[in-house]
Image: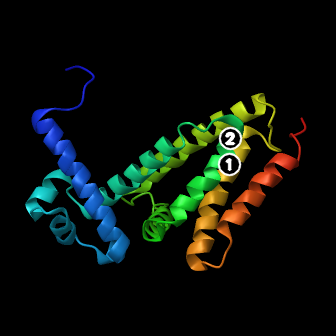
Amino acid sequence: MAGGKPRGPYAKSAAQRENILRAARRVFARLGYNGSSMRGIAEEAGMTFPGLRHHFATKDELLIAVLAQRDQEHSAQQADAHGRDWLEALASLLEQVLGEPAITEIFTTVSAEAVRRDHPAHQFFVNRYERIRGEFVQELTCASAEGSPVSASPEQTAILVAAVMDGIQLQWLLDQSVDAKGAFAEFVRLLRTAGPRRP
């Protein structure tokens, strides 16, 4: 049926892929990326190693799929937050991200390594930051139209929001006494109380 859920072998393949991603996420969380193996993930998923390789040829490819799934989950959770409610919703998202420290550590480590153009995840992160900056600009523009402008242009503020969120995560991973949630709340307050940008 057009527009319906996948059926037959397509549905089975999608379900198996989802099973693999859940298993990989559990293994990465327990052992980290370097401590994990494709054979271990296959065992966790209850399938053969060749069966896993049918869906994901390499561990790098599997990692990128896990990170993409994580982004999709976060986007879905933020789907109902727009305009002036959006920045507050980001604080809840940050709290959730910090609740999954092993995956957050992998994300932070790989994103730094991916600055190399030959890194397998390089294009994933280039595309990711381009996408989230665009989404941030849209929500900040909407907030301004609702009477909640920030102190910089939406384009500049979008870069700052992404940088602060990722930077707070890095500092918290290094030292969990850092008040990540409080720091982000103060950042949002500063954005809103500094007054609109002057021409």
Left-right relation of 64 to 110? left
Cβ atoms under marks 1 and 2 closer than 8 Å: yes
Work out how far the residue at label 1 is from the one at label 2, CA to CA, in angstroms.
Answer: 6 Å
Residue 85: mark in rendering: 2
* Residue that carries the numbered disc 1 in the rendered image: 88
* x and y percentages locating residue 2 in the rendered image: 23, 19
Question: Which residue lies most toward the top here?
Answer: 2
Q: Is residue 98 left or right of residue 150?
A: left
Is label 1 in a helix, a strand or a loop? helix
Residue 150: percent from left, percent from top? 80, 42
Label 1: few (<14), some (14–19) or many (≥20) C-alpha neighbours in 10 Å: some
Tell me the colour scheme of the image: rainbow
Q: Residue at x 45, y 61 (%)?
A: 114
| Disc 2 secondary structure class | helix
Tell me: 102 left or right of 150. Answer: left
The amino acid type, in three-letter code, at marker 1 is Glu
Rendering quarter of residue 95: bottom right
Quadrant including the C terminus: top right
Q: x%, y% of residue 154?
A: 72, 39
The amino acid type found where label 2 is placed reads: Asp
Q: Is residue 12 above or below residue 118?
A: above
Give x and y (percent) for residue 59.
Answer: 26, 63
Q: Quadrant of residue 30?
A: bottom left
